[in-house]
Amino acid sequence: MWRSFEPGSSPVDWCEGNYSISPSIAEFTNTLSNLLFLLLPPLLMHLFKDYGRFVNPGIHVIWFLLMVVGVSSAYFHATLSLIGQLLDELSILWVYMAGLCMFFPRRYFPTILKNNRKHFSLCAILPTVIATGLALIHPALNAFALMCLGIPAFGFMIVELKRTKSARVYRLGLRCGAVWTLAVVCWLNDRLFCDTWRNLNFPYLHALWHLFIFIASYTFAVLFAYFSVKEERPQQSPLLKYWPRDDFELGIPYVTIKSYIKLDNNTNI
């Protein structure tokens, strides 16, 4: 068991040279590129405060789990230990599960669940627990399996974008899809064509994967947060906005709620 904590105990090694920059960090660039996972979620928690208050406070679980992914990934790339690999991969699995439980459209629920999201969430958690156990048995297959999870999410995003009447939401969806595709291209190139990129003196595509996949992941969450309110609580009039300027669509997107009731004591509900 303790051997799993030893540096270099993971069978997975990425293209970046080990200990080439720092004698104490195995893959320096891959480790540093996880900073975005730690810096942006606190801001997203602030931007989504209305959403968390008026719609679903569970949205903050997504942002917290993204931070867990960042910490786990940084630990893995800093040590290349087996336990770091498992923490990295399993944290990704659970953030995907959380998003599935929160945003999966009700119209696709099986009839047996009677449109009950709590029952659907329980059904989603069970296979996730099983997958967690299987991940401990065959860790080398986890990365490719996790890559496949993005495909159905991408498909559902396309379906929802076809239903939206908002040009602003549609444009964000196109950018999200483009960034996700770019992230996958970086991951595959780093994994399959490492020698080529080393000959070009640029073995850092996995670090770019971290940056692009974080942008794609939180943008997926923003889009599905919007779709969820639009379908289940249209009376609350969700708005897609951008920080720091709403007219700059390359800023940080978030969803706020336009309609809410003001009580006499000026407390919003």
Image: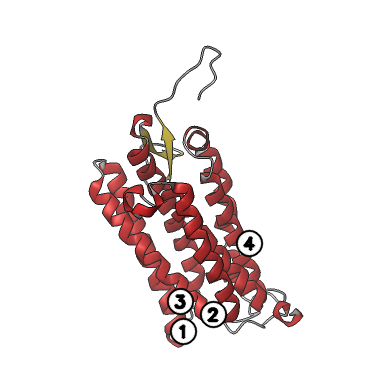
Of circles 2 and 4, which is in front? Answer: 4
Q: Amino acid at mark 2?
A: Trp
Say the numbered circle drawn on residue 71. Answer: 4
The label nearer to you, 4 versus 3, is 3
Tell me which label, 3 or 2, sits earlier in the chain: 2
For residue 77, side relative to residue 208 (left or right): right
Front-most of residues 84 and 98: 98
Q: Nearer the viewer, mark 4 or mark 1?
A: 4
Question: Residue under circle 2?
Answer: 14
Which residue ends up furthest to the top in the rendered image?
A: 264
Q: Nearer the viewer, mark 3 or mark 1?
A: 3
Residue 80 appears anywhere in the view: no
Crowding around mark 3 (Cα neighbors within 10 Å: few <14, some 14 to 19, many 20+) is few
Give the x, y percent position of residue 91: 57, 63
**Label 3 residue SS:** helix
Give the residue type at disc 4: Val
Residue pointed to by mark 1? 194
Location of residue 166 in the rendering, given as x and y in whole percent from the top left corner: 26, 41
Judged left or right of residue 227, residue 63 is: right
Cα separation between marks 3 and 1: 17 Å
Q: Nearer the viewer, residue 122 or 266?
A: 122
The residue shown at (24%, 47%) is 163
Q: Earlier in the sequence, mark 4 or mark 1?
A: 4
Disc on res. 165: none
Marks 1/2: CA–CA distance: 8 Å
